[in-house]
Image (cartoon, helix red, strand yellow):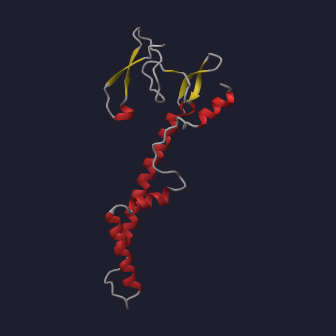
């Protein structure tokens, strides 16, 4: 298979980067407000505030005994505090994603050398990756070989399924 065919084959797979954040920086305000107004309480107070605004500025429709800002002010305060909290948490997720995606991995080069500077996000389908004991695994990988004589290893999948027990894996018998 030529180099051009290999690059076409690689193009059909997604990259190895992870994204756990909910928002990006451009759509954060609108997406966050949409999420917040999915809560019935926030939507209720928005409707009540709108009705009070109509009654306050158009008394011929109906009379509102209270200022609309008595409900609109606390609603804006709650939305603002929640938005700030969500933004802070999401920025921590972005930082964690960047740290994980840029961890160096050991990948076998075409020349047969181990390149230790490949970020995990650049590991692609078909790359041969060396994982030493105790290190996290950067992707869904197939175990080709192990330092144990029987070709087995133990994997902790707590990042995937939340369980912290070790799961036994066996290498391919062909290797």
Q: Quadrant of residue 20?
A: top left
For residue 26, above or below residue 67: above
- Give the side of residue 18 with respect to residue 155, left or right: right
Residue 97, above or below 90: above
The location of residue 114, given as percent across then percent down, is 59, 18
**Residue that appears at 43% across and 55% down:** 84
Position of the N terminus by quadrant:
top right
Residue shown at 40% from the left, 58% from the top: 35
| Residue 64 shows in this picture | yes
Foreground: 71 or 131?
131
The residue lying toward the viewer, choosing from 1 and 136, is: 1
Q: Position of residue 87 (x, y in %)?
A: 45, 52
Q: For this rendering, which residue is in front, 137 or 86?
A: 137
Q: Would you identify the image quadrant in which residue 73 lies?
A: bottom left
Residue 57 located left or right of residue 3: left
Residue 101, position in %: x, y? 52, 35
Q: In the displayed structure, does residue 158 sit left or right of residue 132?
A: left
* Residue ranking furthest to the top: 149
In this view, the residue farthest toward the bottom is 60
Residue located 33% across and 69% down the image: 44
Q: Nearer the viewer, residue 101 or 171?
A: 171
- Residue furthest to the front: 1
Residue 70 visible in image: no
- Is 153 rendered above or below residue 122? above
Number of marks: 0
Residue 59 is situated, as x and y percent measured from the top left of the image, at 37, 89
């Amino acid at each position: 298979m030529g180099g051009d065919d290999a690059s076409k084959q690689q193009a059909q797979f997604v990259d190895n980067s992870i994204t756990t954040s909910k928002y990006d920086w451009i759509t954060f305000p609108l997406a966050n407000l949409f999420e917040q107004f999915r809560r019935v309480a926030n939507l209720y107070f928005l409707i009540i505030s709108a009705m009070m605004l109509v009654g306050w500025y158009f008394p011929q429709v109906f009379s509102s005994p209270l200022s609309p800002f008595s409900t609109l002010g606390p609603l804006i305060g709650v939305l603002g505090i929640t938005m700030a909290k969500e933004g802070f948490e999401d920025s921590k997720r972005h930082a964690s994603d960047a740290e994980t995606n840029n961890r160096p991995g050991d990948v076998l080069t075409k020349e047969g050398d181990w390149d230790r500077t490949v970020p995990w996000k650049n590991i692609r389908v078909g790359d041969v990756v060396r994982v030493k004991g105790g290190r996290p695994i950067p992707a869904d990988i197939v175990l080709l070989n192990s330092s144990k004589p029987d070709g087995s290893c133990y994997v902790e999948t707590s990042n995937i399924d939340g369980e912290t027990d070790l799961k036994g894996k066996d290498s391919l018998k062909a290797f």
